[in-house]
Amino acid sequence: ATGHSCYSAEQSLREGFVTLPGGHRIGICGTAAVQDGSIRSLREISSLCIRIAGEHRSAPAELLRWLDGPVLILGPPGSGKTTLLRECVRRLSEGGSRVSVVDTRGEIAACRGGVPQMDVGAHTDVLTGSSKAEGIMLLLRGMNPQWIAVDEITAPEDIAAMEQASYCGVKLLATAHASAPDELQKRPLYRRLCALELFERLLIL
């Protein structure tokens, strides 16, 4: 899974997964080796969770009409948030919009040798492997995007970077773990997101 080089996958292994060509992901569980309060590696592997990525172009025909402004996709784990995010990116790109994607785990576009293995559209620029916060700022400075897409908002830094992008007139497309809008208000991170009013529409899975 790591191409016979655990060192090259050290960062993702610390986070408990390895991404395979094609956007597939192997979640890893075992014994954590902790140093200075942080997980440095995993050893004595006890179980794996293999998630198979796939393209599903079954989104409603009116999807592009829904993308008239910044959109946040909500859903529980495994509900298809990343799949729908990818389809939104493709539809926007095919419609002529300049879209930039921060593909932190290589699951949205699944780039291999710099070439997306998933269809994200011809007008889409993909940054793979970067953190969402740093990636948003890099794309904002360098790629002149009309839209920036990220998967799974998980940190205050993500929200700060999205706020900066919105001030520059960039529309946002993102996903978050929640089954309903009221769940957003129960979590401090997402309450901050709601207070900023960065998104005009919610798509709920």
Image (tube, helix red, strand yellow):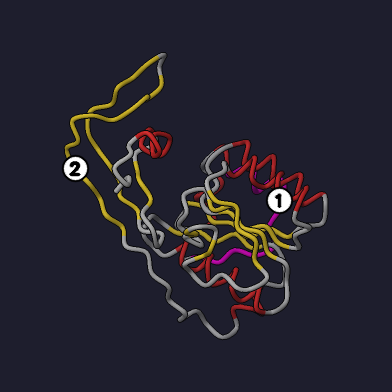
The residue nearer to you, when weighing 173 against 54, is 54
Q: What residue type is labelled 1?
A: Leu
Q: Which amino acid does label 2 sit on?
A: Ser
- Is residue 50 toward the left or the right of residue 196 in the image? left
Relative image position of residue 61 (x, y in whole percent): 56, 86
Asked if residue 91 is positioned above or below residue 7 in the image, the reply reads below
Q: How many marks?
A: 2
Q: Quadrant of residue 131?
A: top right
Relative image position of residue 179 (x, y in whole percent): 45, 57
- Is residue 124 toward the left or the right of residue 110 in the image? right
Which residue corresponds to the image point at 52% horizontal and 65% vertical from the top-left?
Answer: 116
Q: Check disc 2: other Cα within 10 Å, few if <14, some if 14-19, many if 20+.
A: few
- Residue 137 belongs to the span the image colors magenta: no
Q: Name the residue under label 2.
A: 47
Relative image position of residue 102 (x, y in whole percent): 59, 52
The residue nearer to you, when weighing 35 against 185, is 35
The residue nearer to you, when weighing 194 against 98, is 98
- How far separated are the C-alphas under marks 1 and 2? 36 Å
Q: Name the residue under label 1.
A: 139
Q: Which of marks 1 and 2 is in front?
A: 1
Which residue corresponds to the image point at 52% horizontal and 72% vertical from the top-left?
Answer: 119
Q: What stretch is highlighted in magenta?
A: 190-204
Q: Which of marks 1 and 2 is nearer the N terminus?
A: 2
